[in-house]
Image (cartoon, rainbow, N blue to C red):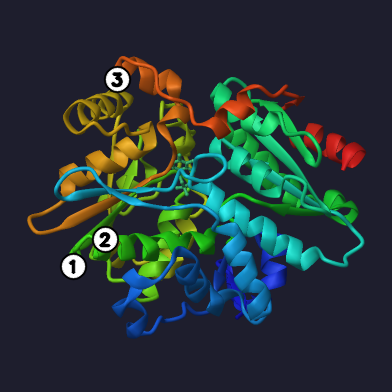
Amino acid sequence: MQFYSTNSPDVKVSLKEAVLRGLAADKGLYMPEAIPQLDASFFEDIENKSLQEIGFEVLKPFFCPDIPEDQFKTLVDDALSFDIPAVKVTDDIFSLELFHGPTLAFKDVGARFMARILSYFVQGQDKEINILVATSGDTGSAVANGFYKVAGINVFVLYPKGLVSEVQEKQFTTLGENITSIEVDGTFDDCQRMVKEAFMDQELNDKLVLTSANSINLARLLPQSIYYHHGYAQLRKQGVKDDIVYCVPSGNFGNITAGLVAQVMGLPVKKFIAATNINDIVPKYLETGEYIPAPSKATIANAMDVGDPSNFVRMMDLYDSNHEVVTKKVEGISYTDDQIREGVKRVDESKGYVLDPHGATGFMALENKLKDGEKGIFLETAHPTKFPEVVEPVIGRKLDVPERLQAFMKGEPKNIQLKATLEELKTFLLKEA
Ligand SMILES: *Cc1c(COP(=O)(O)O)cnc(C)c1O
C-alpha cells in the first residue's frame, strides 16, 4: 500500500518513507491511499478471535508485504502483549480498559508498534534514527518505554515544565540509555511547535535522520484501530451486537481517527462521540462548521490539553472535509474540570468504578448522549493511579499503585532544560544526537 500527504493527494510514498518521515515534506499528514475493507466473515466470528489475531488481520493490508507477513505476525504478537478487557460499568456503558500495558495508558499500543516497525525498517542502516516527541504526559512515557534500548534509535522527549504529573515525568526521565528528556520552559503547544519546526529545518535534516513519534506518525496511529475491533468483539461476547456507540476522550484526535478508520474498514459502529475537556475546538467545529484553533488551556485531564489537534486534518480527509458528513459520524461534547471531578466521584460512589480524568469525560459523554436501545463503550485511556493528585482527593482515599508504576517512582530522574525556541533545540541536537 502507498500513502499520500493530506496536502498533496497525488503524490504517493511507500510505507517505509511515510513511517521514517512521520510528517510529509509539505507539512501534510500521511494517509493510506485506500482504506481496506474487511470481509463480512471477519466480523461474524470476531468474538472467537484473540487480540493478536484481530490485530494481524486488521493491520495486514496496511503493512504487508512491505513487512513480510511472518515477521509482521511476530511483531504484532510482541507488541500486543497485554490484555484489553471491556468492563461493564452500567447496564448500557462499558469501559474499554486500555491501561494494562507497561505505562498504563493506551499510547502503549501505538508506541510499541511504532518502535517495532521502525526497528524493522532501520535494520542494516548505518545512520541512527532520532525520534523527537512532544508530550503533555502520556505520549512521552509510552514512546520512551516502547523504544527503550531499541538499537539504532535515539529518543528525545520534549515536555512542558511544571505541566506534567510527577508519575508521568518519572516514566520517561528515569530511563536513561537511548532516552533523553528535555524540559521546555513553555507549554505543550510550544513543545509541539518546536518538534514541527525541527522537522522543517534544512540544516537539521541534512545532518540528522529525524522522525516523529507523535500520533502524526502512521505507525502509531493505524495500530490503534485494533482495539476498536477488539472492543467490538468483547461486547459481542457479552451479548451486545448492534447500535454500538464508541466514545473517545480526545486531545490530538489520533485515537478517534483510528476508530473512524476502523469504521470505514467495516466495523459496525453506529456513531462516535469525541469527548474533550475545555479545549473544545473540535466539538465547536462540529457544532458550527468553523475550526478555530486556540492556545491550549491547562486542565486536570492534561493529556487532552490541545488547542490545535494535529489529527483534525486526517479526520476531515476521511470525509472529504465535508462538515455535514462528519457530523453524521461524530458528535462532540466537552467537560470542565469541576464536571470531571463530579463524574469521578459519582461513578466511584454509585458503581464502585474508579475513572481517570480522561475516561471520565468519555463516561459522562455516553451518559449524556446515549439514546434508548444504544450501548456505549468508552475508551478508558489511562489508569486512575497515573493521576493521584486529581483522583484521590475526589474519591477520598488512596489508590493502590500497580507494581510497574511503583518501580518507576523509585528511579532517579534526569533531564536537560531548554527555552521554548527552535534555536535552543537545534544547538542541543547538533551537539548531542
Ligand atoms: C493521549 C491521551 C488522550 C488523547 O488521545 P488523542 O489521540 O491525542 O486524541 C486521552 N487520554 C489519555 C490518557 C491520553 O494519554
Q: Quadrant of residue 148?
A: top right
Sequence order check, earlier mark of 3 and 1: 1
Give the CA distance from mark 1 to mark 2: 10 Å
Comparing labels 1 and 2, the label whose residue is closer to the camera: 2
Nearest the camera: 51 or 360?
Answer: 51
Please report contact status of discs 3 and 2: CB closer than 8 Å, yes or no.
Answer: no
Give me the residue at 43% from left, 25% from top.
Answer: 400
Question: Which quarter of the rendered picture does the C terminus lie within?
Answer: top right
Residue at image location 37% in from the left, 19% down from the top: 392
Q: Amino acid at mark 2?
A: Leu
Q: Is residue 65 above or below residue 366?
A: below
Binning the other alpha carbons within 10 Å of mark 2 as few (below 14), some (14 to 19) or many (20 upward) gives many
- SS type, badge 2: helix
Query: Badge 1 is on which residue?
Result: 242
The structure residue drawn at horizontal position 58% and vertical position 64%, both measured from the top left corner, is: 77
Check mark 2 vs ligand 1: CB closer than 8 Å? yes or no.
no
x and y percentages locating residue 220 in the rendered image:
58, 57
- Residue 389 seen in the figure: yes
Image coordinates of residue 45 in percent, x first then y, are 32, 77
Looking at the figure, which quarter contains the N terminus? Answer: bottom right
Q: CA distance from mark 3 to mark 1?
A: 34 Å
- The residue under label 3 is 395
Q: Amino acid at mark 3?
A: Ile
Q: Does 73 appear above or below 399?
A: below
Query: Residue 235: which disc?
Result: 2
- Residue 337 — which label? none
* 3D distance between C-alphas at marks 3 and 2: 28 Å
Disc 1 is placed on an element classified as loop
